[in-house]
Amino acid sequence: MRRMFWSGTRAMAGVGLALGSMMACSQPQQSQQADAPEAAMEAAPSAARGEYLVKIGGCDDCHTPKMMTEQGPVLDAQRRLSGHPATLAVAPIPAGALTPAGWMAMTDATMTAWAGPWGISFTANLTPDATGLGNWTEDMFIAALRTGKHAGNGRPILPPMPWQGIGQLTDTDLKSIFAYLKTLPPVDNVVPQPVAPAGPKPGM
């Protein structure tokens, strides 16, 4: 094409330049128009995206009770994301089992109760039952993951919950997660309150 422009008349060259300018001006507009639907989809929270984020985020790893099988622990589908079972007592922690120079954390057989320097924490019920997130609002859910406070203004959210990382998600993603959790079958399960660490408290 360049040979044609250079060997042709000045008029043809002018037409070629004009066409090139028109194409260059129109391409960004077409690109913006093509990107508009995708941007709109990203801006709208959806339970489908929430399901995807819950799965790749590994929420089941801690919030769903496990059943022990010959192949190891598997998820209890009947109690999915319902947190630590209310009726399941945790075994006593042997003295000296958790030390800065040894093991820093341990978990029970269901992987829903965790012990460490913070004491004992129990994973929350994330189902829409009244004992879980049933009375939570979207704003409370987002605030909890942004601040690390239960319901956004309560007690600290304890390890191993990685709220610091999850809290970096966009509002759209957090709203999508909340929307998906609201679609789960509700499970009546009052998760125990955290147990403070034994012994003197830091600074005392």
Image (cartoon, rainbow, N blue to C red):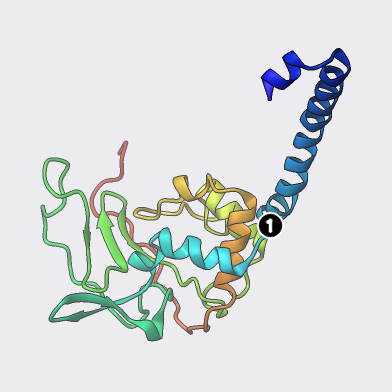
The one of 160 and 115 positioned closer to us in this rendering: 160
192 is higher (above) or lower (below) than 156: below
Which residue: 55% across, 55% down?
154
Q: Residue at x 22, y 69 (%)?
A: 108
Which corner quadrant of the image does residue 130 belong to? bottom right
Q: Split into 4 quadrants, where in the image is the N terminus?
A: top right
Residue furthest to the right: 11
Residue at 39 percent of width and 55 percent of height: 161
**Can you tell which quarter of the image residue 86 is in?**
bottom left
The structure residue drawn at horizontal position 84% and vertical position 30%, both measured from the top left corner, is: 22
How many numbered marks does the figure carry? 1
Tell me, yes or no, if residue 187 can be seen here: yes
Nearer to us in this view, 61 or 103: 61
* Dot 1 alpha-carbon crowd within 10 angstroms: few under 14, some 14 to 19, many 20 or more: few
Name the spot of residue 194 as percent of width and height, x first.
Answer: 37, 62
Question: Left or right of 166: which side holds 18?
Answer: right
Residue 38 in the image: x percent, y percent? 68, 53
User: Percent position (x, y) of residue 103?
Assistant: 14, 50
Q: Position of residue 201 (x, y in %)?
A: 30, 45
Type of amino acid at the residue the image marks with label 1: Met
- Report the quarter where the C terminus lies: top left
Q: Please tell me whether mark 1 sits on a helix, a strand or a loop.
A: helix
> Which residue is more in the foreground, 177 or 186?
177
Judging by the rendered image, the residue that carries numbered circle 1 is 41
Left/right of residue 199 with respect to residue 162 in the rendered view: left
